Image: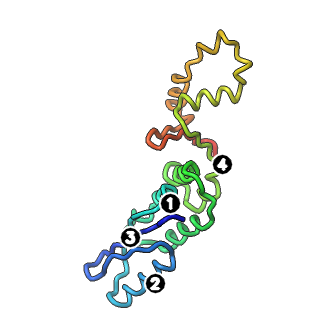
Amino acid sequence: MSNLKIGAMPYCFEGSMFEFSDMDQFKTKWQDLYDRKGTEEYSLEFLDGSNIEQKIYEAMQIDSVGSVDPKDLELFFEILEEDKIQTEAQAFAFWFCVSYLGYAPSVAFDIFTDLYVFEGTPKEYAQEYIYSCVPLSEIPSMIRDFIDFEKMGQDMIDKSSIVHFQEEGFCVDPYSV
């Protein structure tokens, strides 16, 4: 785990913000402020951590609701402890299952490894796909020059065969799960 820090901002004026990096810290600090000031509801914000932790956090949408559901927060820390998501591509696949396909985080955690995520452009995806079906050595050289992988990749996007996330650098086959 990295330098994970999540900030909890109370909804009432009497409470004060606190930071935590695991579920025990959250429970302890939450209980302390509840006992002293009666503060119950917080908005959470990802403050620091690895790209993988941030992508998992974003997928779980923990801070998108008014009141933090401790079960969501516990699941977030369980997923991190499980150490099943080790690469940015895996974190992206988990995020895609939750955010794009609409699976619950607990279900997405079980199926994200089935999702085909390709790191690269649609053109590169189309080229790899074609060469996985027909080896380059079996395609006559006079035909190879006429294969338009750029257009093929764009056609795959247009027909929803793949989804391209340019900023993250991934192409995803949404039907692979």
User: How far apart are the alpha carbons under marks 3 and 4?
Assistant: 33 Å
Q: Quadrant of residue 83?
A: bottom right
Mark 1 burial class by Cα count in 10 Å: few <14, some 14-19, many 20+: many
Label annotation for residue 114: 4
- Image x and y of residue 107, in percent: 60, 59
- Image x and y of residue 162, in percent: 55, 36
Q: Residue at x 62, y 46 (%)?
A: 115
Q: What residue sits right under mark 1 in the picture?
A: 53
Q: What residue sits right under mark 2 in the picture?
A: 28
- Where does the N terminus fall, quadrant-wise? bottom right
Tag in front: 3 or 4: 3
Q: What residue sits right under mark 3 in the picture?
A: 7
Label 3 residue SS: strand
Mark 2 residue type: Thr
Label 1 residue SS: helix
Q: Disc 2 or 3, which lies upstream in sequence?
A: 3
Q: Residue at x 47, y 81 (%)?
A: 27
